[in-house]
């Protein structure tokens, strides 16, 4: 056990980024690559589901929030991504549970897995996280990043636009702008690359507004 390099294991479970796939193709469709990458993750997740579930619980109960457990936290984050994506009940429950942790890093691991890979949008958990950390500007930047990758049914781009009028958002703060607009462009693939170009137009409008 002591000889295990958890950080290396986490790295081995990290799927190549979309840009890696895009750069290997003559022509690429961002949405198609996004979906195929998820499908590949599902294959891995279902194949290793039992192992992932056991390891995730083992990591959680082995004081994963300790200062010297950086590698274990990294591995737990990667495993939860797979478990949440395939809707493994133990994995989803664990992700939800750790969002309420007093440790911000642990809480973010759970929220990220649910936001990126969950079948349901964890708005209630995001709201609880905001209430707990709203007086910590750097933490709220991370919260904005997660909010900006959501694709809420019936709201779509309007949900992202509403973030720009949130009480904690400030156009004069470059980090807040990056957290919302930068994360939206990079991670909200379905909305940013929408066939009607609404995502592109939204970013274009925001760039023009910021440059004024």
Image (cartoon, rainbow, N blue to C red):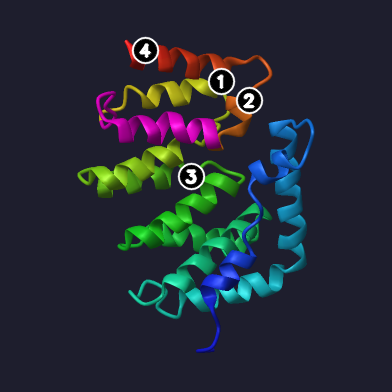
Q: Secondary structure at mark 4?
A: helix
Which residue does the numbered mark 2 point to in the structure image?
193
In reply to whether residue 64 is colored magenta, the answer given is: no
Q: Earlier in the sequence, mark 2 or mark 1?
A: 2
**Whole-percent x, y for residue 96 in the image:** 47, 57
Q: Is residue 67 above or below residue 110?
A: below
For residue 172, what is the image quadrant?
top left
Q: Nearer the viewer, mark 3 or mark 2?
A: 2
Magenta segment: 168-186
Dominant secondary structure of the residues highlighted in magenta in the image? helix
Q: Which mark is residue 199?
A: 1
Residue at the disc numbered 3: 122
- Give the residue furthest to the bottom: 2
Classed neighbour count for the residue bearing mark 2: other residues with Cα under 10 Å, few (<14), some (14–19), many (≥20): some
Q: Earlier in the sequence, mark 3 or mark 2?
A: 3
Q: Gap between marks 1 and 3, in whole Å?
A: 23 Å
Alpha-carbon span between mark 2 and mark 1: 6 Å
Would you say 174 lies left or right of 40 here?
left
- Which residue: 54% across, 89% down? 1
SS class, disc 2: loop
**Mark 4 vs 2, N-terminal side:** 2
x and y percentages locating residue 18 in the rendered image: 66, 43
Q: Which residue is mark 4?
A: 209
Q: Earlier in the sequence, mark 1 or mark 3?
A: 3
Q: Are marks 2 and 1 in contact (CB under 8 Å)?
A: yes
Mark 4 or mark 2: which is in front? 4
Pointer 4 or 3: first along the chain: 3
Q: Marks 4 and 1, Cα distance to the nearest angstrom?
A: 15 Å
Please tell me how crowded label 4 is: few (under 14), some (14-19), or many (20+) other residues with Cα within 10 Å: few
From the viewer's side, name the closer residue of 104 and 170: 170
User: At x 65% / y 53%, what residue is drawn?
Assistant: 85
Looking at the rendered image, the disc whose residue lies closer to the viewer, 1 or 3, is 1
């Amino acid at each position: 056990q002591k000889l295990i390099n958890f950080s290396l294991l986490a790295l081995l479970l990290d799927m190549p980024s979309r840009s890696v796939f895009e750069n290997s193709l003559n022509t690429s469709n961002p949405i198609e690559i996004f979906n195929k990458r998820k499908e590949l993750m599902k294959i891995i997740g279902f194949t290793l589901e039992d192992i992932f579930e056991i390891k995730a619980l083992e990591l959680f109960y082995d004081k994963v929030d300790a200062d010297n457990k950086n590698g274990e936290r990294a591995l737990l984050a990667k495993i939860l991504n797979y478990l949440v994506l395939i809707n493994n009940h133990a994995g989803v429950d664990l992700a939800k549970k750790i969002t309420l942790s007093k440790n911000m890093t642990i809480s973010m691991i759970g929220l990220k897995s649910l936001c990126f890979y969950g079948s349901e949008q964890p708005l209630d958990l995001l709201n609880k996280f905001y209430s707990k950390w709203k007086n910590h500007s750097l933490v709220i930047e991370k919260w904005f990043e997660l909010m900006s990758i959501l694709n809420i049914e019936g709201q779509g781009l309007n949900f992202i636009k509403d973030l720009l009028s949130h009480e904690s958002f400030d156009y004069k703060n470059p980090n807040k702008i990056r957290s919302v607009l930068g994360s939206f462009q990079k991670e909200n693939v379905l909305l940013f690359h929408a066939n009607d170009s609404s995502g592109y137009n939204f970013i274009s409008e925001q760039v023009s507004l910021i440059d004024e």
